[in-house]
Image (cartoon, helix red, strand yellow):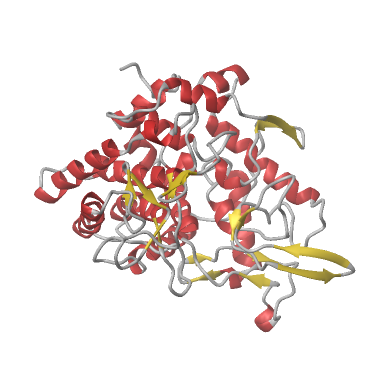
Amino acid sequence: MKTKPEQVSLGASKLAQVQKSTFAYFLKEANPANGMIPDSTRENSTASIAAIGFALTAYPVGVERSFLTRAEASKRTLTTLRFFRESEQSTSPAATGYQGFYYHFLDMETGRRARECELSTIDSAFLLAGMLTAGRYFNRDTAAEREIREHAAALYARANWRWAQNGKAKVSHGWKPKRGFEKYVWEGYSEALILYVLGLGAPDFPLPAESYEAWTSSYEWKSLFGIEFLYAGPLFIHQLSHLWIDFRGIQDDYMRAHGLNYFDNSRRATYVQQQYAIANPRKFKGYDKYCWGITASDGPGPATRKIDGVKRKFFDYVARGVPDGPDDGTLAPWAMLASLPFAPEIVLPAIKYFDDTYPEMASKYGFKCSFNPTFPGSDKGGAPGWISQGYYGLDQGPIVMMIENYRSGFLWRLLRDSPEIQRGLRRAGFSGSWLTAP
C-alpha cells in the first residue's frame, strides 16, 4: 500500500514530549519495593503483569532517552526480577504463579494473586518479553547486570509451555487453581503472535511447531474498504507483538502465501481503522480522517442513552473493534500513537489534530486513555463529551515503545539479536531479511 505522505508540522520535540510524559507512569506509579506496576491510576488498582512487562521494556528506552540513569533502571529491573524469581509458584490460590506463568493481576504490596483472576498465558508472555528485553540490554560486566541476565534467562526457561497446551494443539488462555484450564484457546489472529514465538523459542519446555501451524490455520483473511489483510478487529492486536519484534521483511508460511508480512499487514489494518472512521457507519460524533483509533479501552458505560433520537448502548472497558464492533463512539489516542511506525503519514496528522482540537486529552502522563464525544458530558470547560479519568499501563507501554521504534528502531535492533526470539521465529517458519540462518 503506497500513499503520498501528508505534510504536517509535528516535530520530533512533540513526540519526545509525549514519550517522556507517558514514560513517567512507570517511574511514578511503580512500587519500588517489588517492581509492581499498577494496571491503572484508579484508586486501589492491582498490579498488571502485562504492565510490568511493558515497564521492563520501557526502562532501557528511558536510559537511552535520559529519562533515568542506567543505574536507576538496573536497580528497578533487578528488584522486579528478584521478586518474580523468589515468588511462590504453586497451586495455592494465593501464589504469584504456577508452572512458570503468572496471574493476570497481583497485589501491589505483596505481589500475590488478586481479584481471584486467572493465570494468564498472554499477559505472562508480555511479562517474559520484558524480561528478555532486560536481559539483552543490561549486558555490562557488573554484579547487578550479570544478575539481571541470569534471572531473565531462568525465568524465561521456567515457563512450561507444554503444560499450557492442556493436551491440545493450541495454547490455553489461562488456568485457575480450583477450576483448572479456561475453555478458550488462542486461535484466530491476535496478540498471541508474541506468545507463540516465545513458546516455540523456549529452551526447556517449548511448544511444538505443530502448535503454531494449528494457530495460523485459524486465521481469517478479509477485504474491508478495498484493503485486503489478515483480519483482527481491535487495533491493539496489530500492534502488541510488534513492540518487541521487527517483522519487516520476514515471513512465515501464511504471510508468504499472501505476499505480505506482519508489519505491512499492520499498516493495512491502520488504514482500515482510518477508513472506518471516515465512513462512520454508526454516525458517532468526532469520527473523521484525523480522529480514529478503536481498540481495547476504557469507556463511559455500562449505560444506555437516547441521543438525538437514537438509543445508544455504551460500554466500559472492552476490546472494541471494526467493522463489527463493539463500537460505541469511544476512541483511544494510544491506539493511534502505537501505529506510528506502520503509517506515520496518517498518524502524525492525527496526533497534531488531537493536540490542537482536544487539549483536554493531555495531562501528566500524556494522552488520556480514551474519550467519547457522543456520550453526554458535563460540558464543564468545553470537554468533548466523556473523557476517561484514568491511565492504564496497557496503554502507556505501547506509546513509549512504538514512539521509540519509530524514532530510532532501538527495541527492534536490540531484540533482533535475541537467540530466544530468533529460535522461536525460525521454529515458526519465519525467514528473510535480518533473520539470518543460524
Instruction: Point out residue 47 in the picture as x, y percentages from the top left corner.
Output: 39, 62
Q: 175 above or below 307?
A: above
Q: 250 above or below 347?
A: above
Instruction: Point out residue 328 in the picture as x, y percentages from the top left corner.
Output: 73, 59
Instruction: Point out residue 102 in the picture as x, y percentages from the top left corner.
Output: 36, 49
Q: Say which quadrant the C terminus sits in.
A: top left
Q: Nearer the viewer, residue 333 or 183?
A: 183
- The residue sitting at 81% across, 55% down in the picture is 282
Residue placed farthest to the front in the image?
178
Q: Say which quadrant the N terminus sits in.
A: top right
- The residue sitting at 33% across, 46% down in the picture is 98
Q: 430 above or below 154?
A: above
Q: 365 above or below 99?
A: below
Q: Nearer the viewer, residue 355 or 85?
A: 85
Residue placed farthest to the right in the image?
309
Rendered image quadrant of residue 220: top right
Q: Nearer the viewer, residue 368 or 164?
A: 164
Rendered image quadrant of residue 156: top left
- The residue sitting at 14% across, 44% down in the picture is 146
